Amino acid sequence: MNKKKLVYTLFLVVVAILANIVLVTRQNDYKNEQIEYNFTLSADSPLSLKVYYLTAGQELSDTNEGQSFTQTYTKAGSEQEISLRMPSDLSYIRIDPAESKGTVLRISDLTMTFHGKEVGVINLAKSNAIYSQQANIETTDGINEITCTGEDPFMVYVYNINDYLPAIKEAGSFSELLKKILFCVACDATILLLIVKGKQAMEIPRDVYRNRQLVWNLAKNDFKTRYAGSYLGIIWAFVQPVVTVLVYWFVFQKALNAASQSTKAGLAIPFVAWLVAGLVPWFYFQEVVGAGTNVLYEYSYLVKKVVFNISTLPVVKAVSALFVHFFFVAFGLILAICYHYYPSLYTLQLLYYSFGLMILCLGIIYLTSAAVVFFRDLSQIINIILQVLIWGTPIMWNYDGMNMNPVLKAAFKLNPLFYIVQGYRESLFDRVWFFEHAGLTVYFWIVTIFVFLLGTTVFRKLKVHYADVL
């Protein structure tokens, strides 16, 4: 083993050891988990019951429709089981029996279930209600009897997760252990793959580095010629995304009355600023994957030249798209400043997330640009996937405020773009370091490295056939 290979191997071994230490020692505070809350409801007349929740850091004035559930009670005198999924880091629960003056409700103590195990009971007694309006609360044998005395009654109860954390941790201990084992195995397998396939894995990056000046010149030319012949020229590259932002803003905020979005940190972010922070990485991903898939056809005259290194062409598209991307990063920063979210050290993470996004995109287009030469329909399939993926990524909808099955909610995190979109928003607003999501960070880089290795390997294997097919 030569010296360079030895240094390379030792470096990866150290990275693997550090990653395993981080994953094994990482402690989940369970404050962002979905907990199932169950209670039994009975009343002397049919009614519509609305339950609002507020998370840590939010005040009562932050109550909004995005953090609420509506349950319909139809059969007077009967008992109805109510089940809701809400974040564990609740601060307040507000119960509104809508338009039910004179109605008497009976609610059993609210039980919490996590991973199928009961982890606590929230006391809805009068002593725990910090505020009530047009409602009298009485507690007898664990049953809370609420008499509505006005047209708009509601009760607000305080909640403290620290009272239930030990039971929550015990219930989630097995799944947490299993998650750590899977992450460590996946991480070690990825590092081993990089060690074994290191020479092949670095072949294309070396080619790109050797031809970096050519890549830069082609990228600039690609950006300039894309709109050549039009009156506005490259201005069109910025106009289309801006119009898209305006359309989404009008539809969601003006037409559908989308309110400010609540984050894990309890911040209420103005919708347009929150939306732009999610769209900025998406615009780059969409541009690179869409245009990069057809790069070999677009530059077929270079592919057929024996002396030209075609491994650099996908990088040309990725670099070309950076001009518009950095413009919109600046646009997002200015918009955040307008809403008094000023740049900080956390903002520098946008460079990290942009780098991760670029590597992910490169892995994808090395694979798709190689495959589309032999299967032309793939270009149309990619366009359809992009149309679906924008809704499968939390860009126009708030992941933190969604009430859904924990399995389905976890499935959304399997999308590597989830990590990037959330990272952009947390860098601008929540001010969270990327390493605070250790598990998600390791998962993203495992997927990204795997996709990059797969894409470059397929591209390199099929390279000898491109000129003949094109």
Image (cartoon, helix red, strand yellow):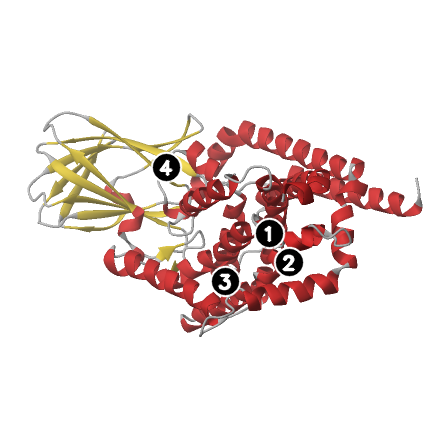
Choose the circle earlier in sequence order: 2 or 3: 2
Separation of residues labelled 1 and 3 (CA atoms): 33 Å
In this rendering, the count of numbered labels is: 4
- Give the x, y percent position of residue 22: 67, 43
Mark 4 touching mark 1, by CB under 8 A?
no
Q: Disc 4 to disc 1, how far (Cα)? A: 40 Å
Cβ atoms under marks 2 and 1 closer than 8 Å = yes
The type of residue carrying mark 1 is Val
**Residue annotated with mark 2:** 316
Of the numbered discs 4 and 3, the one sitting upstream in the chain is 4
* Res. 330 mark: none
Q: What residue sits 68% from the left and 65% below the top? A: 216
Q: State the SS at label 4.
A: loop
Q: Label for residue 428?
A: 3
* Residue 68 visible in the shown view: yes
Residue 266, image x, y percentages: 41, 55
Q: Which residue is mark 4?
A: 404
Q: What is the three-letter code of the residue carrying label 4?
A: Met
Which structural element holds mark 1?
helix
- Left or right, 465 with respect to 344, comes to right
Q: Secondary structure at mark 3?
A: helix
Q: Which residue is mark 1?
A: 295
Q: Nearer the viewer, residue 270 or 433?
A: 270
